[in-house]
Amino acid sequence: MISCEEAATICSKTQYKEASFIEKMRLSFHIFICKTCSKFSKNNKHLSSLCEKAKLHTLTEAEKVEMKENIKSEI
């Protein structure tokens, strides 16, 4: 059986579709046994779905560089 810390790591990897089949199976078994990790997993999935629905906008690399240059010139 995996530890709760490992379960949290695998849960996060699953969220980003980086977990292997074996890791997912180990996580499923752990979640079946551990109610705390089960709740964590459920909350993690909910948070992921909210972020996807929000359609968050991030800056492009060019915008980030421009912003950094503007900050440096102001200092």
Image: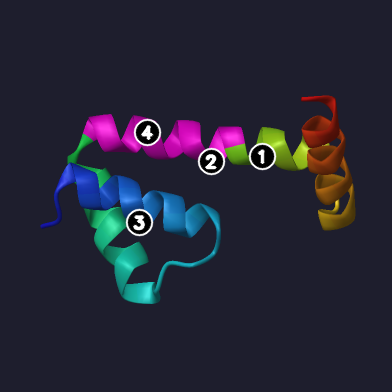
Q: Type of residue at label 3? A: Ile
First-in-chain label (3 vs 1): 3
Where is residue 3 drawn, in percent x and y?
14, 49
Q: Type of residue at label 1? A: Ser
Which label belongs to residue 40? 4
Distance CA(mark 2)–CA(mark 4): 9 Å
User: Which residue position is annotated with label 3?
Assistant: 10
- 59 inside magenta stretch: no
User: Which residue position is annotated with label 2?
Assistant: 45
Residue most toward the bottom? Answer: 21
Distance CA(mark 1)–CA(mark 2): 6 Å
User: Which residue position is annotated with label 1?
Assistant: 49
Callout 4–callout 1 Cβ contact below 8 Å: no
Residue most toward the top? Answer: 75
Distance CA(mark 4)–CA(mark 1): 14 Å
Which secondary structure, mark 2? Answer: helix
Q: Is residue 21 above or below residue 50?
A: below
Which secondary structure, mark 3? Answer: helix
